[in-house]
Image (cartoon, coloured by chain):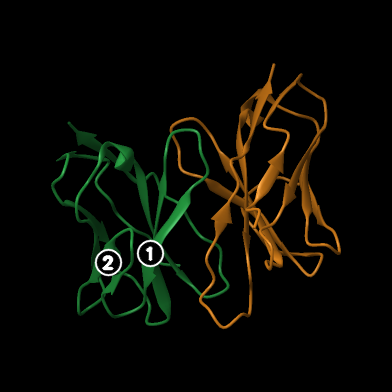
Chain colours: A orange, B green
Amino acid sequence: DAGVTQSPTHLIKTRGQQVTLRCSPKSGHDTVSWYQQALGQGPQFIFQYYEEEERQRGNFPDRFSGHQFPNYSSELNVNALLLGDSALYLCASSRLGGAEVEKLFFGSGTQLSVL
Amino acid sequence: DAKTTQPPSMDCAEGRAANLPCNHSTISGNEYVYWYRQIHSQGPQYIIHGLKNNETNEMASLIITEDRKSSTLILPHATLRDTAVYYCIVTRAGNQFYFGTGTSLTVIP
């Protein structure tokens, strides 16, 4: 049973460019959340997708957008990259509305460097 | 969601119990306490969660005070592989998980 998978693992971009990160959730999960983790900080919530809709959003600008596909996989898009967008981007999947209390399962992340 | 307060760092001798405290004095009745840990450069890993009662699984034990305003994560026999940042999170069902800065635990040989 594959866990949460993210691609790519590392990425280097320049300021002003756009980037797309991808996430496949754990089998049986229907919800994907994205987090940004700067060096030395805890993960910061970007947004969550459920039933192909953005369900919750953290304090991030509109340059950060996402999408969820019918197979529950998800993409995170960041436009007009800034140096400060350099971070580890984490995807977490979960199952909403199930009998169990929701638990997040994380991928290993995509390390984005903006030069 | 209730905010949490954790010490920034702790040390523990290998083989001894590691007791990681968390204060969540503004917790609401329907909010759960979760613990996650993050080993360097990896994604956070779920450890345990609870609502009111103490919980135990193969990884750890969670002790929640009767007033629910604080909790302690116990790693019964710490190993070097338990060196990580430990996050205490309080949230209600269906809400986002807010990660603070956590406690950096170092297990010393």
Q: Residue furthest right?
A: A70
**Amino acid at dot 2:** Leu
Q: B31 above or below A79? A: below
Give the number of marks: 2
Q: Is residue B34 visible?
A: no
What kind of element bears circle 1?
strand
Q: A16 above or below B37? A: above
Q: Which residue is more in the foreground, A23 or A112?
A: A23
Provide the residue designation for mark 1.
B48
Q: Measuring 38% from the left and 60% from the top, which residue is drawn there?
A: B3
Report the Cα–Cα distance between label 2 and label 1: 7 Å
Circles 2 and 1, Cβ within 8 Å, touching? The answer is: yes
Horizontal relation, residue A85 to residue B62: left or right: right
Q: Which mark is residue B89?
A: none
Label 1 neighbourhood size at 10 Å, few (<14), some (14-19), many (20+)?
Answer: many
Q: Measuring 46% from the left and 51% from the top, which residue is drawn there?
A: B45
Q: Position of residue A11 (x, y in %)?
A: 72, 26
Q: A101 above or below A80? A: below
Subunit bearing disc 2? B
Provide the residue designation for mark 2.
B62
Q: B1 above or below A37? A: below
Assign the N terminus of chain B to one quadrant of the image: bottom left
